[in-house]
Image (spheres, coloured by chain):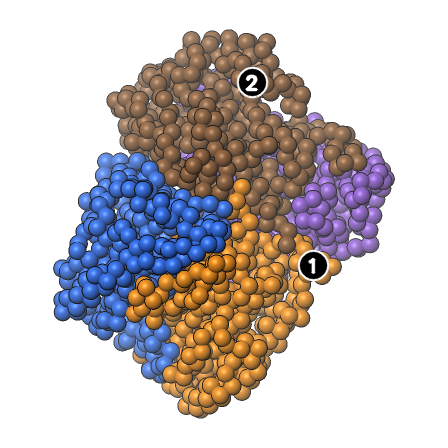
Chain colours: A purple, B brown, C blue, D orange
Amino acid sequence: MPGNIFGSIFRVTTFGESHGHSIGGVIDGCPAGVRLDLNIIQKDLNRRRPGQSAIVTQRKEPDKVTFFSGIFEGKTTGTPIGFAINNTDQKSKDYSHIQDNYRPSHADYVYDEKYGFRDYRGGGRSSARETASRVVAGAIAKQFLSPITIDAYVSAVGSLKLKTNPSEVDLSKIEENIVRCPDPQMASEMEDLIKKIRKNGDTVGGIITCVIKNVPAGLGEPVFNKLHAELGKAMLSINAVKGFEYGSGFEGIQKKGSEHNDLFNSDGSTKTNYSGGIQGGISNGMDIYFNVAFKPVATIMQNQPTINSKGEEVQMQGKGRHDPCVVPRAVPIVEAMAALVLADFTLIKRTNKA
Amino acid sequence: MPGNIFGSIFRVTTFGESHGHSIGGVIDGCPAGVRLDLNIIQKDLNRRRPGQSAIVTQRKEPDKVTFFSGIFEGKTTGTPIGFAINNTDQKSKDYSHIQDNYRPSHADYVYDEKYGFRDYRGGGRSSARETASRVVAGAIAKQFLSPITIDAYVSAVGSLKLKTNPSEVDLSKIEENIVRCPDPQMASEMEDLIKKIRKNGDTVGGIITCVIKNVPAGLGEPVFNKLHAELGKAMLSINAVKGFEYGSGFEGIQKKGSEHNDLFNSDGSTKTNYSGGIQGGISNGMDIYFNVAFKPVATIMQNQPTINSKGEEVQMQGKGRHDPCVVPRAVPIVEAMAALVLADFTLIKRTNKA
Amino acid sequence: MPGNIFGSIFRVTTFGESHGHSIGGVIDGCPAGVRLDLNIIQKDLNRRRPGQSAIVTQRKEPDKVTFFSGIFEGKTTGTPIGFAINNTDQKSKDYSHIQDNYRPSHADYVYDEKYGFRDYRGGGRSSARETASRVVAGAIAKQFLSPITIDAYVSAVGSLKLKTNPSEVDLSKIEENIVRCPDPQMASEMEDLIKKIRKNGDTVGGIITCVIKNVPAGLGEPVFNKLHAELGKAMLSINAVKGFEYGSGFEGIQKKGSEHNDLFNSDGSTKTNYSGGIQGGISNGMDIYFNVAFKPVATIMQNQPTINSKGEEVQMQGKGRHDPCVVPRAVPIVEAMAALVLADFTLIKRTNKA
Amino acid sequence: MPGNIFGSIFRVTTFGESHGHSIGGVIDGCPAGVRLDLNIIQKDLNRRRPGQSAIVTQRKEPDKVTFFSGIFEGKTTGTPIGFAINNTDQKSKDYSHIQDNYRPSHADYVYDEKYGFRDYRGGGRSSARETASRVVAGAIAKQFLSPITIDAYVSAVGSLKLKTNPSEVDLSKIEENIVRCPDPQMASEMEDLIKKIRKNGDTVGGIITCVIKNVPAGLGEPVFNKLHAELGKAMLSINAVKGFEYGSGFEGIQKKGSEHNDLFNSDGSTKTNYSGGIQGGISNGMDIYFNVAFKPVATIMQNQPTINSKGEEVQMQGKGRHDPCVVPRAVPIVEAMAALVLADFTLIKRTNKA
């Protein structure tokens, strides 16, 4: 309930502030006998890491994960998997200017309202640094889920939007550019836009699309825990996310039912996939796909008027290092959260029949 | 986990199939001493009820709720509130045609894949009739939440879209027309569109916008249980919902951070509200608003080719009664689910400080 | 959390006050395809029912259960099973004497402290009448669990104690007498004792022993959710229970490790069973057995001095109908709660391996 | 569900194997603003630590805890508190003899049945070393709970039993001897008995009694989550525990209701306290007290016949270091688990009234 535990059977608890000793988590409920390749986990961490390219924040964090438990002779044991990532680039002095001042559209003000005070260093718990723990857990979930595949990519930056049908995208091209957009031409335009935005000390939003393949029918629970409801919660829990849609999404409302219904083939697959692989909250075996909208992040390199904890007007200086556009680094986070949802439902499905 | 329980402290469990004995639920965790006006609860049920106007399904269900427990001398006692609504208009014979046949874009196929068989009468548990139980629970949550107000309205039907800023809408006009759109001119156009769609035996989608006022700062939990993440899950758990966005939503991605940041007034309120009343997953005291996209419902009054449980091609006849557009009746459901989320977080907030 | 939901996957929510409209519950997470014999459920209810014999309370309640959902064509569907039992013998006037007065060793005082007021009629939610809902849910769990068998019996009343090893008791004899003690001679003595106690308007405590057979190895989770920890919680949640022990229990503390260790046979079974079928919190395939201690119930037919809600001394009159000894009627409740625990762990076990 | 998370709002997740990298945990839901004295936490760890006296195992573990997050400027922040204790005295070679052999009355056999394989080093996750994480979490809960006090002591070793009423024990004497029995004479006899048992390479059981003072009325939830039910689960989840009783417990069954009822004083306190401070599952403001039975631990320094994973008979050699009697070191564990239960219910109580 207090909000740092995710999942019902495959359950992840995370901890850690941006500038504390370390961040990390515990996975409880990972089945025994999953053979883990730790390099794959680190690889996903590297995709989220600051400093990885010219269009992301230049902070330096190696983000090296240490596992404490739950893995023995290369396999999960069924007991909790504890892990941590040390915070190395803490530069706490960078943040003295926000000790008493509230950054606009950040969580500073609401944390003070909620808890009475806060660890102000680097945003503390509200920093997106927290998502590194999710990436670790998700990378383990992915290995459990194989042969289900989960691939996310950047489909929009600002007003630049890739219109290709998600099931027709060449997913092998995602990691070929630093934007993580599978269309090289569009990727190049997006990169230019981000660089321009950055030069102005500003930020811009974007969309990440995720495609999940090889999903068996029957994942998701009716009523409150529909598969897309949990995916939606998972995505909306990621920092800076403002919207979620799956299948035909917001555009689908303009269609008529007679156009929008997915007619069956004789094997139970469907001729179209406006449903996005989910019907009545339950996977039907078709590709699952969804979009996640990220706002322009609030940390900008421009001065802004704001208030301090006494309600006095103060000037907030734009300084330090920031991400001009969060979506390239958020791709592995989207995948991780999707993996956690699917891992949980995969286990729950085993309990559906007598 | 099996999906019929919602909330962590203010917790609702629902049961019931469309054509079984009854539907209903249990609210566990409603605080003691909430004075309940049962008429208000019935009034919300009536807003969801079939047969209420010319643009909704003409099924006849009185949807009269009976309370079993948890209320004494007009007040909640702190013990579970059990309730049920009898199914009266069951006409089970109407549904013999779907006993073995899978309706396109319905849950028939996935239920069989998941559970091995299903109560096929009227869609069984996958019917939106289930949401009446949510409306009961939500109407109780609303009375607990007062003076917080929760008002939803139809903001789009097909391509007709109301563009008014949610905080400037005259909420008192919502119930003045059968579409539940607060703009009379737009409501009239929407009504015409729905009637035209209906005449063709077809359906169309729409958007419901919800506005929540008088929210104290501090609701919502950081990380996984962000306020908008739980609101998103709640909305996406409603039948036919395909998308959720709050504050600036999907459009916000095109803004720059310098435009999108909400600058503070000295009292902690903000000059703009792109945040939609939520920052870092926690309410900041401004109006909360969000959009919910509903697809065109899959039940159409046209014949469609489909398959049966043996994979044979069969013809699905369009017959019976249906909603040409689900949004007018879904308005109280959106409000109810929002109320459940806020009631839960209101209680959790009491545990945040020592 | 608010205490009316039990279990994690096989989950039961109950509602209802002693003298309200009805009591009942919802089972969420019962797997699909369990063939249910409703007569077996009613039979367990009859074993718990007041008025069943000369040594229990003479209240008249038919305790007839109505199912609302989740069962179709004789089988569970995987959707929630809602049910209720109407309260018919409400005689609310009987309870006016406790409206403002606190019965000693009852929950009247603490309910007022906790909730500010209470439904005082017949003890309201704190009445053991609530356990009828548990018996319904447990009787369904038993049918899911077959061929696991769960049998409870009375092993002590006051100072009369049956010393037979639980695994050697003839369980077929339990229902042959109204005490539910499988030893006819001891049962007769217990019956005499209860009748004598009753004549004095007094009450006496007792012990129920439960034996579970055909349990596969591997049920129960390490650390916090040990099988015996959940069984203990389940038993201690039953009204009037004061203690729980399993296997060698409290007596076992006097043994030496060299005497107490259960040595293995070559098939993994053990030569002795001081472990009570559970090692490290996990079933090992041997019979599970445990004892549950019930206090002498607090409702006596004697006058007692007590206080009212203003703290004034008043006289509490002993009147109405009461159980001189609760254990004969509590036997099916113990079985039901054990069944709920085992059903839950049976489902969880399916998620233990990749 | 998978068993390594405890509590509903004040929630502890633990991880770690006896001989892995480290053990530790995460506390989610500790309210913000609790001033923490880290020395008090370490002091409780030292009371549980191996090697602390002549009557416990001579393994050397400093059990030094490191906090990762959730504490800032000496106070809790409301965000998760992550922590770990490194395993330093791992001597993994000591355990090669149990790699394929099943120790009698240990969890080796059931882990293999449940998970397919196990981390056999030092018992892995089933080792009582895991309880050090509980002590850390409990020591934080205690500081939140102040002025509620929680004191446990050894009341029985083998057949030596302290009969003093728990409310009359001089709790200040508990830590004055290495047995942790508050009666010096009895403590001396117990120490002699333990030393004798140890000389024979054997083990013996015991009882720990816990007394909780200054508890407000109203903690605990009716029905399934009764205060004593959660305390019982908490205690039964501790390694080697076989039984739990509170208030009059197992002995109380022999009393008559007219003797056993606790009559009120005019201030709501009671003249006697057979209820053990809990009525109807809810605290009534009187002292809470309960007994916890610990079996003779299974690790003995004698040779025993047993089987290996192939079902072959083998000889298990008694070697290494062991606790002849577990209760002196289990005292802080009992206190810690009691503190976690009370912390959770203290927070839940805040949600009981409108």
- Tell which of B190 and C100 is nearer to you: C100
Mark 2 residue crowding within 10 angstroms, few (<14) / some (14–19) / many (20+)? many
Mark 1 residue crowding within 10 angstroms, few (<14) / some (14–19) / many (20+)? some
Residue A325, how many percent across, how many down?
Answer: 72, 38
Residue at x-position 24% and y-position 71%: C161
Which of the 4 image quadrants contains residue B86? top left
Residue B349, how many percent across, how many down?
Answer: 60, 45
Classify mark 1: helix, strand or loop: strand
Total marks drawn? Answer: 2
Q: Give the position of the N terminus of chain D as an image quadrant.
A: bottom left
- Tell which of C200 and B164 is nearer to you: C200
Residue A153, how many percent across, how many down?
Answer: 61, 37
Residue under pointer 2: B174
Q: In the rendered view, would you say C300 is above or below C279?
A: above
Q: In 3D space, how far apart are the residues under numbered discs 1 and 2 (Cα atoms)?
A: 48 Å
Residue under pointer 1: D75
Classify mark 2: helix, strand or loop: helix
- Tell which of C86 and C297 is nearer to you: C297
Callout 1, which amino acid? Answer: Lys
Callout 2, which amino acid? Answer: Ile
The reply to whether callout 1 and callout 2 are in contact (CB within 8 Å) is no
Residue B327, how many percent across, how many down?
Answer: 50, 21
Residue at x-position 80% and y-position 40%: A311
Residue at x-position 76% and y-position 36%: B267
Q: Mark 2 lies on which chain?
A: B
**Res. B211 mark:** none
Q: Can residue B34 be seen in this view?
A: yes
